[in-house]
Each structure stands twice: as C-alpha cells, then as structure tokens.
Image (cartoon, grey):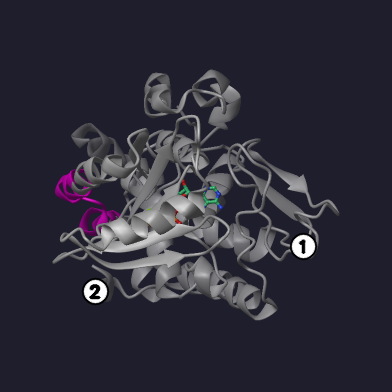
Amino acid sequence: EPQNLTSLRVFVKDKLSGQMVDLFEACQQQTSDLDRKEACRARLQVDIQKQFPESRLYLTGSSMSGLGCRSSDADLCLVVTGNRRPHPMDVLCQLQRDFRSLSYLVRIQLIKAKVPILKFKERGSFLEFDLNVNNTVGIRNTFLLRTYAYADVRVRPLILVVKKWARHHQINDASKGTLSSYTLVLMVLHYLQTLEQPVLPSFQKTHPECFDPLMDIDEVPDGPRHVRPYTSTNQSSLGELLLGFLRYYATRFSWDKQVISVRQATILPKTNSKEWRNKFICVEAEPFEGSNVARAVHEKIKFDAIKKCFSESYQMLNERKDLASILALRAII
Ligand code: ATP
Ligand code: MG
C-alpha cells in the first residue's frame, strides 16, 4: 500500500487531483473497519453453523473489493451446501428467527427482492450487514472488481470520489430507482477500458483462467493473486479522469443505443431482447450473467435526474476545476 501511494503522486499534479486524494484518504475503508467486519463475520458463521452445519459465510462487496468507504455496509453471502439444499428464502426466514436471540444483533429485517436479503446491524455500532443466501455470483464478481481496483493506482480514488459524488446527488440508491454502487463501479471501469489509451483491459479476456465462472467457490478469493497490475500508457491525472468520466456520460455515451460490457471492454449495440428493450440504462451484469444491473432505473423522471447530474456536474467541474463545486467536501468526511 505505501508503494501505491508513492506512485499515485505522479497523477496528482493539479488542485483537483489533490482534492480527490485527500477525500480518498479520509474516506477509504480502514484496516480497523475491515477487522471489525471480519470479527463479526466469524462470530456469525459459528452461530449460523449451529442451524446449518454445511454452510460457510463469505464477506463480499466493497468491504473486500478495495472499493469500500468507512461508511460502506458489510455484504455477506451464506453458501449453503449439502444434498438437501434449501430455498434461499426458507434459510433467510429461519435465520431471521435465530438472529433475534443473538444479543449482538439489532434491527433485523427481511427484504423480499429478486435476490432476497436479511438486513441487520451490530449492536452499539454503525455497522450494517446485508446477507444473501447462495448468490455466489457476488463472491465471484467481488474478486474480479478487486483485480480492477488494484490494477492501476488511480482506480480506487476515482471510484470512491464517483460514489461520493453520486451519493451527494442522491443518484446512488437502487431501492429508490437510481444507480446501485455496483452499476456505478461498472460505469467507471467501462470508461477506463474504452479510452483511446485505456487505463484498464478486460481481465476476463486477458486472464480467463483466473475468472472461470465454474471455479470452485473456495478458490475464487485466490484466483486474482496471479494477475499483475496493468501497465497503461495513459498518463492522465486523477482530475482529468474524473472530468473525462463526467464528460463521457454527459456528452458521448448514447443511453438509448448502447449497452455497457465490462466483460468485453466495449460497447454493445442495444438489441431488442427482453433484457434491454425499454430500459433507460443498460449495463451488462458482470461477469457471469447477461442481465441488466441498471434495471432499477425504470422511471423516466429518475433517468432524467441522473443524466442531468452528469451534464451539470460536467459543466461545473470543467469551469471550476474544483471538487467542492460538485460535492460537499466537508459534509462527507
Ligand atoms: P457500497 O460501498 O456502496 O456498499 P458495494 O460495492 O458493496 O458498494 P453493493 O451495491 O452494496 O455495492 O453490492 C454489493 C456486492 O453485491 C457488489 O460488490 C457485487 O459483488 C454484488 N452485486 C450487487 N448488485 C449486483 C448485480 N446486479 N448483479 C451481480 N452482483 C451484484
Ligand atoms: Mg456494499
């Protein structure tokens, strides 16, 4: 990590880039935050295994991908194996009952979505958990994202700032019809992959063996260990990349004709298939399924608000070159 920070300095020559690094350093997940999440995961696993002996609990999402903030929730995936594999919803209902007798958990809530989850908090802290059952694609894509996160020193600060920007403008909440963090991350990766001088490749193309969708789930966390950082010829500063990201979605990307594919590091034409038809924003769910991660954006009014954010923030940042012009710096940290 210290090595990373040294080389990041090369890309921080202007005020805007400096502001981005400051925000990143103030907000990025600390080792102590991760230790806390891991301790809670281990304790929960012991309690869950009393009911489901053939199960294992994995920490996923931004906590593990390197794209987390201090305030990020802890995403958990319970992998239940064995011959009689129960339905995820049945497992969650059972856990909901069991968790009520665990004194270290509070505010336990079952969310019946396409991927149902149990939400809860650790007593006496701000730590929030989202637990799903057997949605193992989340484990696989977490470690793919982790590979992108560490492939170039600019990726993590850029994504953190974009997440904070989106949160500030209230366009980062899939449950309210806007963009999930996962969608935002894929949008940034796509931008970095499709620059004239790309900052990132498609790791599924360059290292298919590390991201084989059939790989045993226990081996997934170690899969990317052999992927070396990508050497890019692109020398853009952090600030230039942020401005470029906003410019791309404000002026270049064609929302009604194009589908984002991080898997292929390219744009795909929007076909008339069920997945893309009548959708405002199309982002291929990486990396192992073809569904649309941006399907939460289904209201025209929310879609327009998102586009407006991109174009207004682009104009503002282009004019002022000051991060404070597009998000409230002090309120955030
Ligand atoms: P945050 O820091 O805001 O919590 P996050 O990266 O954890 O960001 P979430 O939206 O909480 O993002 O999603 C958690 C994880 O769940 C993602 O990292 C991804 O692995 C997985 N995930 C979320 N949405 C999808 C989806 N539509 N398809 C596949 N995997 C998804
Ligand atoms: Mg999360």
Q: Amino acid at mark 2?
A: Arg
Question: Does residue 300 appear to the left or right of 71 in the view shown?
Answer: right
Question: Does residue 26 appear to the left or right of 163 in the view shown?
Answer: left
| Residue 330 image label | 2
Front tag of 1 and 2: 1
- Measuring from the top left, give residue 10's x and y in whole percent: 32, 40
Q: Main structural element of the magenta stretch: helix, strand or loop?
A: helix
The kind of secondary structure element at disc 2 is helix
Residue that protrudes farthest toward the right in the picture: 272
- Measuring from the top left, give residue 5's x and y in whole percent: 24, 40
Residue at 79%, 57% (x, y): give it: 257
The kind of secondary structure element at disc 1 is loop
| Residue 256 image label | 1
Q: Residues within 10 Å of mark 2 (few under 14, many from 20)?
A: few
Question: Does residue 82 appear to the left or right of 47 in the view shown?
Answer: right
Q: Is residue 9 visible?
A: no
Residue at 73%, 59% (x, y): give it: 254
Q: Earlier in the sequence, mark 1 or mark 2?
A: 1
Magenta-drawn segment? 21-39
Say if the magenta span includes residue 11. no
